């Protein structure tokens, strides 16, 4: 049996990481891999920077140092893949692969890498994947080949909400408090979303309110004169229906498990502090 990592969660623990990774870190593989592999080949990773005095660079602030350091403090090994490619041999040493918001300026996934991830999951590995609103940084296009193999639909809208569900002035910063019963939502009271995206509703376990809507991204032909944020207009248009939207996804695949969160800021230092 694989090594068991026991994580106890009580009340409203600030580090959402524990809830998500508790789903993975259990005896589910024939060999004895342990720990998490953080992909820094296809993504940027600022978990080694974190909040710093006088450093307000957005992406540094959006890093997950608090979450990663807390996992390490609980004895969970967290390694960073900074070069090379994802292979079956590499993944065999870990329980979880973390892919935190891929970006078009990083390397693309090759077919052998996609097949290695699929095989890893089939054999009992875990995938923790972070997406975001619309198609920011072209993540939706980059991830579609992988997610298609995992029978997961990629979405390209921003989850917007109203009324008491808002965390700020605009409709994109919202409070999530509606959860389906699941190991990763147990004892979870709420999540904070700062302009996040929706996930495949077939496997969603965390939802926006019934007053929310999917704000479509605006992209002219050839992506001319458009920022890499690919935002919509943050206004509900006639073709954007009202209704709850999934923001966290949990899915079994083969012997393995997948969790997708639709917002990088959800696991960023300001919201885990």
Image (cartoon, helix red, strand yellow):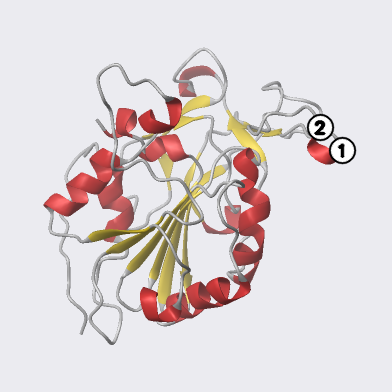
Q: Residue 206 versus residue 43: which sits nearer the camera?
A: 43
Residue 249 numbered mark, or none: none
**Residue nearest the observer in this picture, 55 or 220:** 55
Count neighbours of disc 1 (C-alpha within 10 A) and say few if under 14, some if 14 to 19, many if 20 or more.
few
Q: Residue at x 32, y 28 (%)?
A: 270
**10 Å crowding of disc 2: few (<14), some (14-19), many (20+):** few
Q: Tell whether 102 sits left or right of 94.
A: right
- Up the image or down, 120 lies above or below 216; here it is below
Residue farthest toward the right in the current orientation of the protein: 221
x, y percentage for residue 241? 73, 35
Q: Which residue is mark 1?
A: 221
Indicate the position of residue 191 as horizontal and vertical percent values: 38, 36
Rendered location of residue 260, percent (x, y) = 47, 53
Question: Is residue 140 something one can see in this rendering?
Answer: yes
Q: Residue at x 48, y 50 (%)?
A: 43
Judging depth in this view, the residue of 25 and 191 nearest the camera is 25
Are the residues flagged by discs 2 and 1 in contact, CB closer than 8 Å?
Answer: yes
Is residue 268 depicted above or below 111 in this figure?
Answer: above
Eyeballing the image, is 74 above or below 37?
Answer: above
Say which residue appears at 79% left-offset and 36% top-offset: 223
Which residue does the numbered mark 2 point to in the structure image?
224
Q: Nearer the viewer, residue 157 or 97?
A: 97
Question: Can residue 124 be seen in the rendering of this structure?
Answer: no
> Tag 2, which secondary structure?
loop
Q: Against 225, is 72 above or below?
A: below
SS category of the residue bearing label 1: helix
Residue appearing at x 59%, y 37% in the figure: 133
């Amino acid at each position: 049996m694989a090594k068991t990592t026991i994580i106890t969660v009580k009340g409203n623990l600030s580090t959402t990481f524990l809830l998500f990774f508790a789903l993975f870190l259990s005896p589910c593989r024939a060999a004895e891999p342990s720990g998490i592999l953080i992909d820094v080949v296809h993504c940027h990773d600022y978990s080694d920077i974190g909040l710093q005095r006088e450093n307000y660079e957005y992406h540094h602030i959006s890093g997950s140092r608090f979450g990663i350091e807390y996992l390490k403090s609980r004895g969970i090994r967290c390694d960073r893949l900074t070069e090379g490619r994802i292979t079956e041999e590499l993944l065999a040493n870990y329980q979880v692969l973390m892919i935190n918001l891929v970006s078009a300026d990083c390397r693309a996934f090759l077919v052998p890498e996609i097949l290695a991830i699929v095989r890893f999951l089939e054999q009992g590995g875990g995938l923790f994947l972070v997406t975001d609103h619309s198609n920011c940084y072209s993540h939706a296009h980059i991830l579609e080949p992988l997610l298609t193999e995992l029978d997961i639909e990629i979405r390209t809208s921003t989850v917007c909400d109203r009324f008491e569900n808002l965390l700020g002035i605009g409709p994109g910063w919202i409070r999530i408090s509606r959860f389906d019963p699941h190991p990763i939502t147990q004892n979870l009271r709420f999540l904070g979303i700062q302009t996040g995206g929706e996930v495949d509703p077939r496997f969603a376990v965390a939802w926006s309110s019934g007053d929310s809507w999917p704000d479509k991204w605006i992209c002219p032909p050839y992506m001319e004169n458009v920022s890499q944020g690919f935002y919509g207009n943050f206004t509900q248009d006639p073709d954007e229906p009202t209704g709850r939207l999934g923001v966290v996804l949990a899915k079994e695949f083969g012997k393995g498990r997948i969790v997708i969160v639709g917002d990088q800021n959800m696991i960023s230092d300001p919201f885990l502090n």
